[in-house]
Amino acid sequence: MIYDVNSADEGLYYCNVSNKYGINRATNRLQVFKPTYFVRIPTPKRLILEAGETAEVFCEAVADPRLPIKYQWTINGKVLTESKYYEILPDRLRFRSVRGRHSGIIDCAAITDVDVKLASMQLIVKDVPAHPVVEAAHCSERKATIKWVAASDHGDSIKKYIVEMFTDFKKNEWEVINEEVNVNKENFEVDITLTPWVNYTFRVVAVNSHGRSDMKIDGQSKEDWLTCQTRPSFPYTNPTGVKGEGTEPDNLVISWKPLDRYYWNAPNMQYLVRYKLDEPIHGWTEFLVEDSLANFTIIRDQPTFRKYLIQVQSVNSVGPSIVEPEIHHGWSGEDVPDEAPRDFRIDTQINFTTINFTWNPVHENIVNGHFVGYEIEYWKTENTVRKYSIKIPANSTYKIINSFHAVTNYSAHIRTRNKRLRSAPSLPVSFAMPEGPPGKVHNLRVYSVGSTAILLQWDAPLQPNGRIRGYFISFQNDKNETEETYVIHRQKYYLHEKSEPDTGYKVTVWAETRAGEGPTTLRPVRTWPPRIPDAPTFRVKNISLDSFVVEWLPNNHSVWKMPGAAFFVNYTAESSNTWHQSEIIYLPNTEILLRNLKEDQKYFIQGIAKDGPRQCESVFLPIKTLNRDYANRLKEDSLRSAAWFIAVLGVLGIGLFTICLTFCCGNKNRQDKFAVRRKEIEIGHQQDNEEEKQFLEYQYGFKN
């Protein structure tokens, strides 16, 4: 025995053996090698990767120079070979797109003929869990019991286990039937209720924050599915959604929701339909609907709108359902109600848009169906084609309608309604809506055109609700001082030239009719500080041999600044030293006509803008009047254009005349003119009363 062997112990060793017969020698050589040791080992000791990542670890050892060395990598004791996940190099192991199943203890073995050295590390790949291993599945006619053991979480804690199934009726449509959230145990068991005559397929799935377990990811080609098949039996349920509602006055339509194949419990699903009048003297009638997908049947030759008792029962090849079907109520078809409400009338005319109608209630016996209420139809007298309708519940005997237009003639009638049909209309009532206060003025524009001038422009109200008599205008300054004025209905503008400079104003405009004043429309504005107005912008157009039209552009084409409230021009011929002044125009007027000019003569025109006593002149604009030859050419071109225009108008006129003639012939017998209008025609135009003559329209001569 040699202890603490070292290199000095190398050499040949002899063993001499002798006995009485002689001597024998055995020879052996002792070689002493340096031990193998690692210079690089796999690090870190615990390597954590996400699924799909790439990494590499190093392993390098030194052996006795006389000994060859080789490396061997193993995972959980299994030797690794080159694959798409592992690349083995002389001094390292490279991981490529690893998954959770590659987690484990990685060993690097440095092997010589004399010794073996190991270096270890732990690889953890965070991934979806491993697929649970199902230990057992027991199936009976009504229950399946599934048992499984906890799956590897692959570095990410499992949150729950899911039991899923599909049937042959819905192939590969997985349905979750159980969730197990108590995951802190090793063994699991769940009971699942089954239905007769169904082929079931089950699986168990583990879930963590990375997703669901997948056997393909675990490297298995086929999933661990469990199957169960149950035998046929009687139906356990009956159709739902059973209704009875006729579609014609003499039929009864019974409908239901067919059973899903999952609940058939056996082949040849059919439906037993039973019905009877809900009256003591009548018995049940029944028949079988053999189409398993049918969802209704029609029973003809029944009395109008009578109450029925209805049942629908499931029947398969084994027999009828084990549950007695529920009795439902239904009705045969509805017919037209016998009459409309009587004494339909106007109870109160509340205002210019609102009327309260009233009528006598009808008895349910004449409705010939489900009494859902009434329907009022109304229309403008001059347009009987377009009608408006309003539905009213059955317990009402009046209705307030507020959608009429002022100063309009209407007619209205009422009908009785059941769920499907309406009665004939009642006798119509005709009425005229009175004048009402107008709506707001439309598109009010307010401009500060000078230091003391404010220009207002607006359009008539979109809802005049009668005849507009005029417009009130109010100006309120920063000191709450108010000035009010009034203009007649023809005028939709106002130039206020008594404002204070550099002052804020609230400008308000509102319309009025005989029925009263409408709501106000307000715009804020501020006058300019005292200064001369902007140089005027204008353009000049020839309109004849001896006249121009000068068009003032106070907004400078698009932007209002300070154009001034008034405008005029000075003009002179090139051959004259005499200047002439035109008339002065005030906003919103923008055109000046210059007459009695000389033919084919050059003129210079200068525009002057005025704001009170201050004014500003433009540069001189040269322009020449027309000569006679040029004017004749323009006239000929205009005549040719006019001829084409007249020809087109002629064709359109013939077409319109044909349409009007057809319309008049089709409506020549329509005699539904409103009585008030006929009375006015018979009496003729009446002299206006004295009160009306006090109005501004008379004072200013604008009365039609």
Image: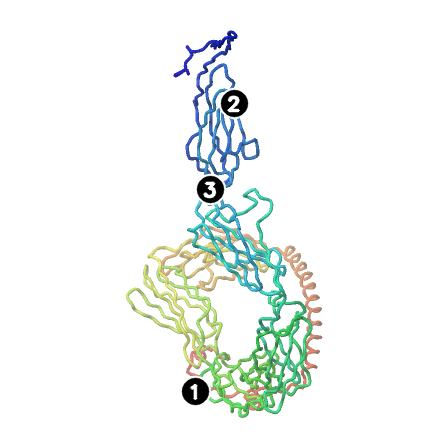
Tell me if residue 656 comes above or below residue 36 in the rendering: below
Q: Earlier in the sequence, mark 3 or mark 1?
A: 3
Q: Which residue is mark 1?
A: 690
Rendering coords of residue 405 (x, y %): 50, 79
The answer to which of 488 and 461 lies nearer the viewer is 461
The answer to which of 688 and 314 lies nearer the viewer is 314
Q: CA distance from mark 1 to mark 2?
A: 129 Å
Q: Earlier in the sequence, mark 2 or mark 3?
A: 2
Q: Secondary structure at mark 1?
A: helix
Q: CA distance from mark 2 to mark 3?
A: 31 Å
At a point 68% along the width and 68% down the height, the residue shown is: 649
| Structure colour scheme | rainbow
Circle 3 or circle 1, nearest the eye: 3
Amino acid type for the residue under numbered disc 3: Lys
Q: Earlier in the sequence, mark 1 or mark 2?
A: 2
The disc at residue 70 is 2
The disc at residue 126 is 3
Tell me if residue 691 comes above or below residue 173 in the rendering: below
